[in-house]
Structure formats: structure tokens, C-alpha cells
Image (cartoon, rainbow, N blue to C red):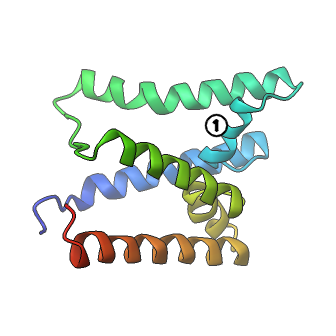
Amino acid sequence: MMENFTPVSALIGGGLIGLASGLYLLLNGRIAGISGIVGGLLSPSKDGSAMIERIAFVLGLIIGPLLLMSGTSIEAQSVVTSPLPVIIAAGLLVGIGTTIGSGCTSGHGICGLSRFSLRSLVATLSFMAAGFITVLITRHLLGVA
């Protein structure tokens, strides 16, 4: 169960995420919520600089890990074994949830909690509870791997 316990890299990664989201808020005055940034790409506004900023942010999310893996011996460890329809359904449910919750785990869990937002605390606790219940039902009660 603890074969993937990596506290040093988790601490470094968490620190970098915190630093990046803090700098994003400080320099741009905006919350670094991924669903809001990607949603802004899907429904473009008339503000061209905001669009360039969103594109750069998303490209950074994709290119950053690729650069890390190309320059080090680190390899991607995630393996997706779920069928494509399940992945599509999960993505749609996440999209619906972030719309209903007015944000995603990064916006509420990282940026909102660091600003002591009560709304973000409730949202983050709801996200976590939903995740715990989903794992309980799918993995432990239904036996789906």
C-alpha cells in the first residue's frame, strides 16, 4: 500500500504548485483554477491578452512535465486502464461538477483555501467526500478495479 510513498517529491511538487498559484494571483489578480482557465478557452472573450495567457497556462501544464521527463530519469507513472466511454463519462461529470461548484479542486482547494474562503472549504470538503464515496462504492463494494 505504501510502495508509492514519496514525501519529498510530494512536498516539492506541492510547494511549486503553491508558489505558481500565488504568483498567478499576485501578478494577474486571478485565481489559478484550471476549469476556469480551460473554460475561458472554450468560450473566448474579446480580451486577446487573457486568451494568450490562458493558452500559455495550458501549454505550460502540458509541456512542463514533458520537459522534466526529457531532462531527467523520471518517467510517467500513471496508467489509465478504464475503457474510453468511462473516461468520457468521468470527464463530463467533472465538467458538470465544476460548473455547479463554481470551480474545480485547484481553484477551491489550493487558491480558495489559502485565502480562507468558507465557500472553498465547503466545496473542497464536498469534492473529497464525493471522491471517498466513489472509491468506496466502486472499489470496495462493487469490486471494480
> Which quadrant of the figure contains the N terminus?
bottom left
Foreground residue among 107 and 133:
133
In percent of the image, x 64 and y 49: which residue is there?
Answer: 33
In the image, residue 36 lies at what x, y percent?
A: 69, 45
Q: Amino acid at mark 1?
A: Val
Vertical relation: 46 (above or below) 106? above
In the image, residue 3 lies at what x, y percent?
A: 10, 61
> Which quadrant of the figure contains the C terminus?
bottom left
In the image, residue 7 lies at what x, y percent?
A: 25, 62
In percent of the image, x 46 and y 49: which residue is there?
Answer: 89
Left or right placement of residue 69 versus residue 87 in this view: left
Residue 8, by quadrant, is bottom left
Left or right placement of residue 28 versus residue 142 in this view: right
Vertical relation: 125 (above or below) 41? below
In percent of the image, x 31 and y 77: which residue is there?
Answer: 136
Vertical relation: 120 (above or below) 70? below
In the image, residue 126 lies at what x, y percent?
A: 56, 75
Left or right placement of residue 106 versus residue 5 in this view: right
In percent of the image, x 72 and y 22: which residue is there?
Answer: 52
Q: Which residue, given by chain and number where applicable, does mark 1 sit on? A: 38
Residue 119, by quadrant, is bottom right
Vertical relation: 98 (above or below) 41? below
Q: Secondary structure at mark 1?
A: helix
